[in-house]
Image (tube, rainbow, N blue to C red):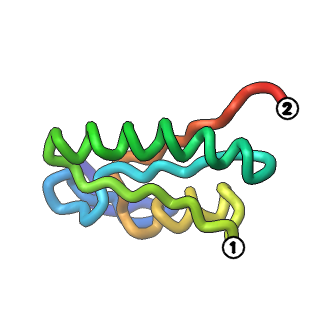
Amino acid sequence: MAHSDDLGLVLPPKLAPIHVVIVPIYKGLEQLDSISNVALDLKAKLQDLGLSVKYDDRDTHKPGFKFADYELKGSSCSGCHWSKGS
């Protein structure tokens, strides 16, 4: 497993401070509330498996910034969940 590339740090999962990052993609607070319920449940299940999980629901940064930020920090896995429809 490589330890760095042109896009940032690549840490082996055993060394990564955060194993999984969940970034919600939403329009409006109603969708955020709906997504948060699912994301927090997923976070709890992953933590029960022994993984370090970050749910990043900050509204001060867009999802693309968050993905790039966690990639530079060496997070081993990131994901997003969004609600379909309006």
- Seen in the image, is 35 located left or right of residue 85? left
Q: Residue at x 74, y 53 (%)?
A: 29
Task: Residue 60: give its label.
Answer: 1
- 79 or 12: nearer the viewer: 79
The number of callouts visible is 2
The secondary structure type at the circle numbered 1 is loop
The secondary structure type at the circle numbered 2 is loop
State which tag comes first along the sequence, 2 or 1.
1
| Circle 2 residue | 86
Please provide percent x and percent y for residue 65.
65, 64
- Seen in the image, is 3 located left or right of residue 71? left
Q: Residue at x 47, y 63 (%)?
A: 70
Q: Quick one: label 2, few (<14), some, or many (20+) residues within 10 Å?
A: few
- In this view, which residue lies farthest toward the bottom? 60
Quadrant showing the C terminus: top right
- Seen in the image, is 77 located left or right of residue 1? right
Please provide percent x and percent y for residue 13.
21, 51
Q: Residue at x 57, y 37 (%)?
A: 81
In this view, 60 is above or below 30: below
In this view, 18 is above or below 38: below
Q: Residue at x 49, y 36 (%)?
A: 38
